[in-house]
Image (cartoon, rainbow, N blue to C red):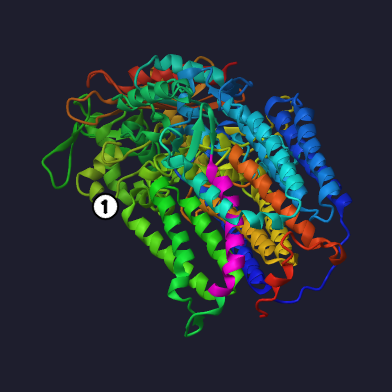
Amino acid sequence: MNRPLRRLSLVVAFLFFALFASTTWVQFVSAGTLNAMPGNSRQLYSEFGRERGAILVQGGAAVATSQRVDDPYEFQRTYPAGPLYAPLTGYYSLRYGTAGIERAENDVLSGSADELFYRNLSSLLTGEKPQGADVTLTLQPRVQQAAWDALAGRKGAVVALDPRTGDVLAMVSSPSYDPNTLATHDGAAQEQAWTRLNGDEDDPLVNRATSALYPPGSTFKLVTAAAALESGDYTADSALAGPQELDLPQTSNTLKNDEGTACGPNDQVSLADALKISCNTAFGWLGEQLGADALEEQAGKFGFGQSLSIPTSVATSRYPTGDDVAGPLLAYSAIGQGSDVATPLQVAMISAAIANDGVVMKPNLVAKVSEAGGSGSVIEQPSPQELGRAVSTGTARTLQQMMELVVSRGTGTRAQIDGATVGGKTGTAQHGVGLPPYAWFTSFAEKGDREVAVAVVIEDGGTTESAYGGRLSAPVAKTVMEAALDG
Amino acid sequence: MATVLPVYPTTRRNVELALVVLAVVIAGGAWAVTGLTVEGSLPPNLFAYAGGLGGLAVVLHLLLRWRAKHADPLLLPVATLLNGIGLVMIHRLDLALDSSAASRQFTWSALGIVMAGVVLVFVRDHRILRRYTWTAAVAGLVLLLLPLVPGLGRTVNGARIWIGIGSLSFQPGELAKICLAVFFAGYLVVHRDALSLTGKKVLFLQLPRARDLGPILLAWVASVGILVLQRDLGTSLLFFGLFVAVLYVSTERVSWIVLGLLMFSAAAVFAATTMSHVQARVDIWLHPFTAENRTGSSYQLVQGLFGMANGGLTGTGLGEGRPQTVPYANSDFIYSSLGEELGLVGLFAVLVLYVVLVERGLRTAIGVRDGFGKLLAAGLAFSVTLQVFVVVGGVTRVIPLTGLTMPFLAAGGSSLVSNWIVVALLLRVSDLARRPAAEVRNGPEGDTGVTQAVRIA
């Protein structure tokens, strides 16, 4: 009976071999697939069970922290400032995932980033759970608070940049939300908050500063003026046609000035004066002279058409092409009323580039990544990056002077700051018949060694007549610039 | 039968003692690690448990020195270590689930080891058991049928394989396994001649005579009966597989295996097409990840797989994973619980322990001189193999999930006691197998030579 016994041993060996193989298959070969499967709560538990790094702002205050709690997830993400920073930090929700910096910097915050590999190697050996790293944002809490207060709950957005580095000093989107309601481990409360926020017509979950695309209105005249100066055919003093109404090709419609008058004697106006009083017919006419290609190229140099991550994702601002700039639409596009769309961040980038003598700096939210807790040793510190040159230094200087004129004697006088050089441009963007227009203001300011560039948009711009960006948005911009220049 | 060269192994009892101590140190260390990780301090009952398990294993070891000094030295340490690992994982799950299965499991472990000692003391020679061939058959059948008795039987998760008296419950099928292994060995060692020497040869197969088909048909009917009446796939497969294996070893005729496989396939196809609970099992096996199944019928399987994937190569470490997410994590799915926290490395170690256990059993079968002992040892060793294969194969999706328990590891008293008895019987047979020829007494029936002289292959 020994021969069949030996054969039986082979059967036994084969059965065990199958088990070794299947166990290897589950735990090694397909482990990655299994770990990524929907409904695999272990990944959530292991991710949520780690001490996630904090999100800090300049000065060291935390705007998102992980607190140890006594529940299966061990840590509760909390946002001490609530809605003030919510559009930036985003949320960290068990059920609804992540958004904002929580998403963009997730691998650093959770401690799984490649940069943290060597540090994690030691925790692998000691058996400790890897701890996430802290992310410090470029935001100045004083400027952020000033922007939030100045907007005072109105629907809109404020962006403040350091023109020399691209650092975002403040970014406010309103209405906002309380990310704590989404981060709670109470499933029912989480779901209720999610349903309410998604059902809200005002889209509180959208960061308007980077994700909302608005018609830029008259702020786009800066791009048109830049294209004109760059072409070499125009100077600040060049005379433009500025009639009461501009005849448009292929239509009986005309482009009108808001005041219903011509922009200057003999229907003529200089480029600088046209910007100062925001003359529609002059810039419409100028756009037609320059052509869609020149405008598109100039807009692209300021950042239109480029996808950005700062490192949160930014909607792509666009200057229209093809049929959207054909015939009468070209003149509209030159004053920001065609199919052009821009984020408030993009509009701020225009002022920033002009203030920075023509060089566009890549906007950036992350100042540094550092070890959590006491040591605070820096792991990563991004350096300022150039996105490109928008205009020559000379053109930039000319545009600076023209914008300063807007603030000193034009439509933007409400943005004047004692002791500081301020240049700006107002905008009032129509976006539908009978709808209140968007009130824009974009500006730069310089005082001592400080510089700041700002864009403000307020969605409910009041009645059409009184809706000049200068009236609503310029005071907001002024408050924000003051906060950035002082202190 | 091939000639076995007489070998004279030393008893290796000291090796056994050293390995038992090592097994207890490993299990105790794992127990300590669990306490340190989960509660931050050494568990207060560490020395009671480790000392208790170790003490009992050492007593059994001393018993072997006294009553079976030539017994295989690896069986006891392997069984002790598996039992210890099981206790640790059950205790770890207790901490997570706030239950107290480990203390019960410890009591059952003690009872199992005591029962093993009792078997070793009273069964001085395994050939005594041949006298009880038909008693074992009746006992096995009664034990199998007990769960069907109204008022006594209990249905757990659809399978009626439990009996309960008050708060105590027991799976008599586990003990029936041993009875039937004894019966198969005793019956076939007598009837192997008739079953192996006669019959027509068709192609390469020597087919048995129709009238010799009786036993296999009976075994088949009984297995199908278990499947239909008790709705238990695993037990049914275990018995039929055990019978076919022992039949093959006793007759050396491949035709029995072919026949057995055909009959099994027929039954499997029949069950898979007509019985709803078997269909459900097959559906879970083939499509566990559909949105509907993974939160419903295949939740347990899928969570087990997620756990094992989470463990990866090296595991999360004891107390660091979430094996408690899986329903029945300490019994049916203790394999995936171990996989999550000890990783692929840990499961390989566990599988190797089973390989060693089974290998020592088969080696015993080859080494022992009497046919009954060969069939008994082979049957017991193969039943452990089948049981491990059915459980692990079910958890890792080689075959559909069935309701068997992992020998020594899974929480459950009946299984633990039965498996300690299995080890005791293997120890008993191996004692004879490894005993120097001069010391081998003739069996109680004085016929060891007869069963060996039938056919020389």
Residue B332 appears in the figure = yes
Side (left or right) of A322 relative to B297 = left
Q: Quadrant of the C terminus of chain A?
A: top right
Q: Which SS type dominates the magenta stretch?
A: helix
B123 or A292: nearer the eye? B123
Does B449 appear above or below A238? below
Rendered location of residue A183, percent (x, y): 48, 25
Residue A406 appears in the figure = no
Q: Residue at x 58, y 62 (%)?
A: B187
Q: Quadrant of the N terminus of chain A?
A: bottom right
Q: Is residue A396 magenta?
A: no
Rendered location of residue B208, percent (x, y): 48, 76
Q: Residue at x 49, y 36 (%)?
A: B163
Image quarter for residue B263?
bottom left
Image quarter for residue B371?
bottom right
Q: Which residue is mark 1?
A: A322
